[in-house]
Amino acid sequence: MASGVKPRVKVPKTAAAGDVITIKTLISHKMESGQRKDSDGNTIPQSIINTFTCDFNGQNVITVELHGAISTNPYFQFEASVPESGEFTFTWQDDDGSTYTDAKSIAVS
């Protein structure tokens, strides 16, 4: 597991049924490309977030596959329609097998 990884998510607390909301996510991650060398000349293994998903009440909203050219601390902003109150679940998968998650609830009136 990479050290210092911290997911951050911003979801409105409330919305009206059928509203389209903006969701913002950021995960602090070094995103090592696997092409750099350490001070001893050894290749530093690749360690990137390779998959990001967002689900709402168990249904997929977005899935993003990432590759070696992705920047440090990947940021995503996207829109989603909210038909009912529920919970957004965010998942980031790392090359080393680590999984980072966060969840945010929204109340629909």
Image (spheres, rainbow, N blue to C red):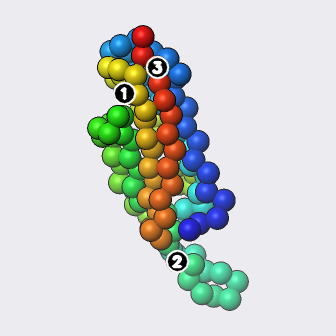
Residue 68 point in image, percent of width and height: 44, 64
* Marks 1 and 3, the one that precedes in the sequence: 1
Q: Secondary structure at mark 3?
A: strand
Q: Residue at x 44, y 68 (%)?
A: 97
Q: Residue at x 68, y 89 (%)?
A: 40
Q: Are marks 1 and 3 in contact (CB under 8 Å)?
A: no
Quick one: quadrant of the N terminus?
Answer: bottom right
Q: What amino acid is labelled 2 in the image?
A: Pro
Q: What amino acid is labelled 3 in the image?
A: Ala
Q: Secondary structure at mark 2?
A: loop
As measured in the structure, the alpha-carbon distance from the residue carrying label 1 to the one carrying label 3 is 14 Å
Q: Is residue 22 above or below residue 96?
A: above
108 on left or right of 5: left
Residue 79 point in image, percent of width and height: 39, 28
Say few, some or many: other residues with alpha carbon within 10 Å of mark 3 (under 14 / 14 to 19 / 20 or more). some
* Marks 1 and 2, the one that precedes in the sequence: 2
Q: Secondary structure at mark 1?
A: strand
Q: Which residue is mark 2?
A: 45
Q: Residue at x 49, y 49 (%)?
A: 101
Q: Which residue is mark 1?
A: 80
Say few, some or many: other residues with alpha carbon within 10 Å of mark 1 (under 14 / 14 to 19 / 20 or more). some
Residue 24 shows in the view: no
Determine the image quadrant of residue 82.
top left
94 on left or right of 4: left
Say few, some or many: other residues with alpha carbon within 10 Å of mark 2 (under 14 / 14 to 19 / 20 or more). some
Q: Are marks 1 and 2 in contact (CB under 8 Å)?
A: no
Q: Which is in the foreground here, disc 3 or disc 2?
A: 3
Q: What amino acid is labelled 1 in the image?
A: Ala
Q: Which residue is mark 3?
A: 107
Q: Are marks 3 and 2 in contact (CB under 8 Å)?
A: no
